[in-house]
Image (cartoon, rainbow, N blue to C red):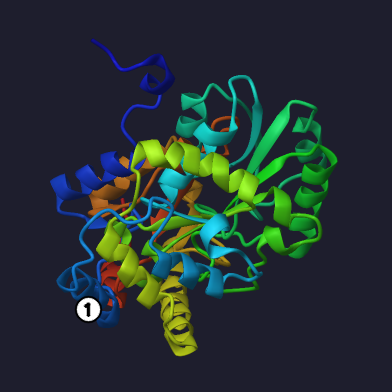
Amino acid sequence: MTTANRLSKFGETVFATWSRIAIEHDAINLGQGFPDFEAPDFVKEAAVKAIRDGENQYSRSAGHPDLVHAIAETFEMQVDPMDEVTVTCGSTETIAAASLGLINEGDEVIVIEPFYDSYLACLSMVGAVVRIVALHAPEFKFDEEELRAVFNPNTKMIIINSPNNPTGRVFDEEELSFIASLAIEHDAIVLSDEVYDKLVLTGTHIPIATLPNMRDRTITLRSLGKVFSVTGWKIGWSVAPLALTTAIRSAHQYMTFCASTPLQVAAAEALKAPDEYFETYTAEYRARRDLLVDGLQSVGFNVSSPEGTYFILADHTPFGLQDDVAFCHHLVNKCLVVGIPPSSFYAKSDEGKGLVRFAFCKTLETLEKAVDRLQLLPSE
């Protein structure tokens, strides 16, 4: 008895592998992107209150009314909360539901690498033909002609991710407008993964759905976990026009039916947080980013400061290791620090082999300790 062919090639996720290695070595885990600090008290208390208030049964499949209204109220354009917002068990489920609900076997889907690793697995489940275009280091920008060349009459969807995990890029208006023009020309859907929309540390996040003629062909993905440090709650959502929402819900209802009811109620309260919360949140992450970037540069990595997310892609080639996997093993053995080998986020090019991904969603104390341990890298 073996794993089905559609999934057997993917194996264990890189996050599970390296989190296990971190535990085995009692190492500082700068690999998987989960905070090592607590969620805000007002968010936790809202969940406790929801449980005590009896919000413990199935919610409306497409999302608790309190939450879908809160999402609509905080979105950058007017949307119908009941018909255009769908709450899922994290945005990873939304990716799967959108793939299952919209993509037929043989449809072509464009993916930009490096990518979040669930994209290809979900597309494999539905038999999609994947076309890949790279963000090229060190600026991590796509070549317009490369992107134009993969669009064709069979293109059903393009998946974009901005702010981008793992590069930290925030696509600018020129880049988004170019993607939009190709999607319109080829009548393609845009699945816009924006789960780091509140983690823009340099520049401005522009939802592609807000660009001219893009509202009716865009699925916007967001989630609660990154913004409120509750990654284990798995509360995500999509905002999309009715036709696309109907397709997403057709899959969602048979996958999970609904997300956790009390956590949805708590999420609705969280989204009502004052502007001061988000200002403090980004300021604290900017300090974490700057500490780790400075520390990596001081040790000898080639690294640029990411514009968004809580990830850094650093060039490890000055240390002379064969590739990213070899480097990450060397790193944990020598320094007791874990990073992620990002070749797992590439399928077409080898550009990930010279890089390592670090997560800075950690306390300043943890990051300072990691930087101290990294001082061992250059020594013989």
Residue 213 sits in which quadrant? bottom right
Left of 115 or right of it: where is 187?
A: right
Residue 63 sits in which quadrant? bottom left
Q: What element carries label 1?
A: helix
In the depicted structure, whether residue 144 falls above or below residue 273: above
Q: Name the spot of residue 228 as percent of width and height, x first.
A: 36, 71
Q: Name the spot of residue 285 as percent of width and height, x first.
A: 43, 75
Left of 41 or right of it: where is 354?
A: right
Q: Name the spot of residue 51 as percent of width and height, x first.
A: 18, 68
Residue ID at (62%, 50%): 242
Residue ID at (53%, 64%): 81
Q: How many marks?
A: 1
In the depicted structure, whether residue 280 falls above or below residue 377: below
Residue ID at (50%, 54%): 313
Q: Which quadrant holds the N terminus? A: top left
Foreground of the two, 43 or 79: 79
Left of 60 or right of it: where is 168?
A: right
Foreground of the two, 6 or 312: 6
Q: Name the spot of residue 31 as percent of width and height, x first.
A: 34, 52
Provide the residue designation for mark 1. Answer: 45
